[in-house]
Image: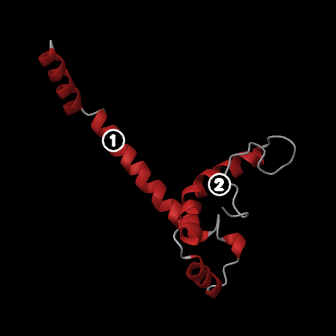
Amino acid sequence: MDEYRLWSFIADMNNSGGITIVDLWLWFKWLFFYPGDYVVNLFIYDAGTEPEFKAILDFFEIPRNDWFGGWISGIASLYIWQALLQLLGSISLFLFSEEYRKELKNRRLEQE
C-alpha cells in the first residue's frame, strides 16, 4: 500500500494528543474517501498498470500526495457510496414492503 493513505482507523487522526472536533471531520473524510482510495490503489498497484496510471497522473500534473483523498478518489467514492446507498434502499424497500410481509406470513401458514 501507499504511504500517502492511512488505511487503518486511528481515533486521533490529527495527532493532537486527544480526540477533538477536528478529528470528527477527519473521520468523515477518511470514511468517505476510503472506497475511492481503494480503487485508485487497485489501478496503481494491484492491476499492474502502475507505470501507465502514474504517467497519466503525472501528465495532468497531479502530485502523488493528491492521488489518495483527491478529486479522482472523491469522484470514485461518490459513485460507490451512491450505488451502495441505492442498493441498501432497494433491499430495505423489499424487506419492509407489504408484499414481502404477506409472502412471509403465507409461508409460515403453509409450514404449520
Side of 66 where 98 appears, left or right: left
Q: Residue at x 86, y 47 (%)?
A: 16
Rendered image quadrant of residue 108: top left
Q: Residues within 10 Å of mark 1 (few under 14, many from 20)?
A: few
View extreme (left): residue: 110
Residue 50 marker: none
Dot 2 alpha-carbon crowd within 10 angstroms: few under 14, some 14 to 19, many 20 or more: few
Give the residue drawn at x 68%, y 71%: 66
Q: Quadrant of the N terminus?
A: bottom right
What residue do we see at 59% from left, 55% from top?
34
Tag shown at residue 29: 2
Image quadrant where residue 90 sits: top left
Outermost residue on the front side: it is 48
* 29 over 111 or under it: above or below: below
Looking at the rendered structure, the kind of residue marked 1 is Ile
Mark 2 or mark 1: whose residue is earlier in sequence: 2
| Image position of 1 with respect to 65: above or below | above
- Return the x and y of residue 101 as percentages of the image width and height: 23, 27
Q: CA distance from mark 2 to mark 1?
A: 26 Å
Q: Tell me which amino acid carries mark 2.
A: Lys
Measured as percent of width and height from the top left, residue 107 is found at 16, 22
> Which residue is labeled 1 in the image?
91
